[in-house]
Image (tube, rainbow, N blue to C red):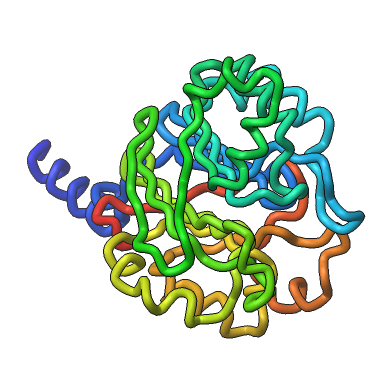
Amino acid sequence: MNKISSIITIIFMLFSGSITAKSISASAQYLGNEGVLITHNNKKVLFDPIFKQNYNRFTLVPQEIKEKLINSAAPFNTINAIFVTHDHADHFHAAEVSEYLQKHKEVQLIAPTQVMKKLALQPNYQQFKPQLHEVSLNIGDKPISFNINSIDAEAVRIPHTGWPKRTEIENIVYRVTIDGVTVLHLGDADINPQHYTPYAKFWADKITHHAFIPEVFAVDEHSTTSAKVHLNARNITYVHIPMQVPDKIKALAVDYFATPGEKRTLKIRANNTQ
């Protein structure tokens, strides 16, 4: 009887997905504008978390969240790495980033050359210089890969939105994998497909479980599906949403971050197909 019960239990688990579905603790928490905290297996990374400008349009990081971040209070304790996509005031503030790094010696920062030049001008530069990892890429360069502080990451330069203008801005797209969970952050990448097709193999080589892409990609009801196909992404959350959420975004019924502190569970199955 016990044997029969065990067989029934196994069959039930198979059909319910309890065996194939991997138990995942991964999550994404919104800070403001394009700032996102990713947490998985006690490892944490931040994208564009420290900035001071919103141009009276985008969402700032609330003071309560910012103080927790600066003071390494939960959930911003034990941060492994910070990724900065580009040197714009609604994504990066040199003085505040330098103060944070000096205070938290264990945190590593990955950023493009333009960001590094701003940090090098800070009076306390020598004290946090060992924590810096520069991404030096030109438009059209091959993607690079690296491992920093137990975090696997890849980077590719995609032109800033507004192309062909503003090509001087070093906008870096990061694909980051934490113990099998892969996220993609596009920064302010331009929407034109010609920027992405040369990297078709790069996107195809690895499934992105969750991508964070700017609001300009949400053009119509087909946009999210198209982005998923081109980027090999299973799920998408839009960021860089104006404080007054556009009616278009609401009408499209896409997933987006608008309220600092809100979270998403990052979904993944053991076979990495979902």
Q: Is residue 94 left or right of residue 212?
A: right
Residue that lies at the very extreme toward the right in this rendered image: 56
Count of marks, rendered view? 0
Give the x, y percent position of residue 126.
Answer: 57, 18
Identify the residue shown where x is 52% and y is 65%. 158
* Looking at the image, residue 119 lies above or below residue 154: above
Q: In this view, does 212 lie to the left or right of 9?
A: right
Name the residue at 63% across, 74% down. Answer: 217
Quarter of the image where the N terminus is located = top left
The reply, left or right, for residue 227 in relation to residue 253 is left
> Taking 6 as reference, is 223 left or right?
right
Looking at the image, residue 127 lies above or below residue 244: above
Residue 149 sits in which quadrant?
top left
Viewer-proximal residue among 152 and 88: 88
Q: Which residue is drawn at 78% across and 78% down?
A: 248
Q: In which quarter of the image is the C terminus?
A: bottom left
Relative to residue 147, is residue 4 depicted above or below? below
Residue 173: x, y in percent? 50, 57
Where residue 95 appears, as percent x and y from the top left, is 74, 29
| Residue 30: x %, y % from top left | 67, 45
**Residue beneath the point at 50% across and 81% down:** 193
